[in-house]
Amino acid sequence: MLERQPSFPLSAHSELYDMLIPKDNFLRQMKELVDFSFIEEELKDKYCLENGRNAEPPIRMFKYLLLKQIYNLSDADLVERAKYDLSFKYFLDLVPEASVIHSTSLTKFRRLRLVDKDLMEALVEKTVELALEHEVLASNTLILDATHTASRFHAKTAKEYVQEKSKSLRKTVYQYQESIKERFPSKPTTNSLEEEITYTNALLDVVEQEEHLKQLPTVKEKINMVREVIDDIHEEARYGGDPDARKGYKAADYSFLGYKTHIAMSDERIITAATVTSGEKSDTKYLKELVETSKKNGMKVDTVLGDTAYSSKDNIQYANEQEMKLVSRLHPVITNGNRNKKLEFEFNKDADMYVCPAGHLATKKAVKKRKDSSQNPQLKYYFEVEKCKVCPLREGCYKEGAKTKTYSVSIKSNEHIEQEAFQETEEFKRLAKERYKIEAKNSELKHRHGYDRANSSGLFGMKIQGATTIFVANMKRIIKLMNEK
């Protein structure tokens, strides 16, 4: 049951917080800046207001999730630290002598209370509201990009992932007591996940029998991480790795298995909108959604920056409708075509026809409409195939046995012509130089907040990780900008 009016007991020891937690402590600053009551409003339909035992307040449970994200801790290590770290207890609205939750409560909170909740939307909206309130968000420029997060299992199965974690535990233990390997169970000889888990549990039993070993912080962290991985696999019953992860591409020769987070960021480097998808989704389709969400959250937008992925015809039309500048270069194929330079045909303006590299003039032309209405139509030029059959330059140009020889060029739409002209202006070039800021933000999310890899399996878990990560990153940025004022 959710208490209607949560009470916060007084304590004679509360003055310790003022004595020992400095004013510039991030948790203190965030606690004093953010009214977290919106979390209770967001989750109240997941609790009973009439029956059952009093539940741990949802605000406090959510704060535990934030602490887990900020300090990259397993559930067990988070709860252990909350027992003695006064800054944690202060942030959690606990008096110094208060007890903390059991780690399983946090697992249940994620899986039972957060289901069907768009936490990302609520958290980003709250941070944008704070940024506007404290006047640290004033620009009208949005920078768009997508960053990828590898699956928790990468391209591994759950069995391989457990194997990796148990190996890491063994290596850590050997640093302190190498002789213990003689007591370890024999490694599995099959490819069975169940056998790997049985082996790993037996390994844990041996290590935990050594009291001096299991109390070492580095060993304890490894033990807790292995147990959390095994518990997640049992709970989710996902024995084949991550079923929601999909293969995406960052380059022609670089793929990843996982997820994408599509991000809109202000010029002040505050994220104003974000959405998490599986890895194969195209960046192009999310421009409108990100802009509209940023506007709904209170930002005014007159300029949008992005890479070539956002310069589709639909996006250019949308930007024109909204009277926004779209600072996104057209794809080189649209601007220059994708022909091999050696096979490039030249246009003869007097004849109004193309001439092939061998000097033969096209005999006729026709408009070819595309099935996809978002693609530009083409002009197809026809050449005398009999000349092509005996041409000394036919290799790579004429396909043997073909009954026709054509050369097609796209007819640029008015939108593309205008965008091509805009991208040559000094204004476009000046604005485009600001796009590096979102690359830096993506790097920050990955390297400072652990967003390079999913910490759970499934799209639901990835969305929770994305929401808490972006909330923390935004709060750090807002507090920094406020302190600089």
Image (cartoon, rainbow, N blue to C red):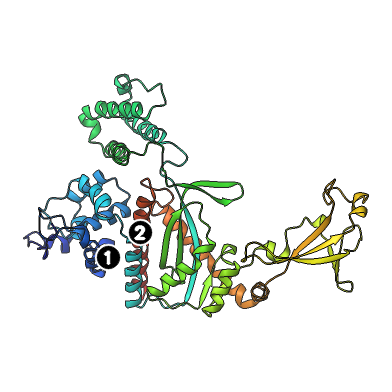
Residue depicted at x 87% and y 59%:
383
Up the image or down, 233 lies above or below 54; here it is: above
Nearer to me, 338 or 384: 384
Disc 1 is placed on an element classified as helix
The residue that appears at 10% across and 59% down in the rendered structure is 50
Quarter of the image where one finds residue 335:
bottom right
Q: Which residue is drawn at 35% across and 28% down?
A: 196
The residue wearing badge 1 is 30
For residue 380, the mark is none
Cβ atoms under marks 2 and 1 closer than 8 Å: no
User: Badge 2 is on which residue?
Assistant: 467
Give the Cα distance between marks 2 and 1. Answer: 16 Å
Above/below status of 150 relative to 186: below
Kind of residue at disc 1: Met
Spot occupied by residue 443 in the image (x, y as percentages of width and height): 47, 56
On screen, residue 285 versus residue 275, left or right, reads right
Q: Nearer the viewer, residue 214 or 226?
A: 226
Residue 82 seen in the current view: yes
Q: Where is residue 270 in the image (x, y as percent from the top left)?
A: 41, 68
Q: In terms of image quadrants, where is residue 429?
A: bottom right
Q: Is mark 2 on a helix, strand or loop?
A: helix
Do we see residue 21 in this rendering?
Answer: no
Looking at the image, residue 293 sits to the left or right of residue 181; the answer is right
- Name the side, left or right, on which 415 lies relative to 362: left
Q: Position of residue 437 (x, y in %)?
A: 49, 65
**Residue 209 location, x and y as percent?**
21, 27
Q: What residue type is labelled 2?
A: Ala
Residue 326 higher or lower than 460, as above or below? below
- Quadrant of the image containing the N terminus: bottom left
Earlier sequence position, callout 2 versus callout 1? 1
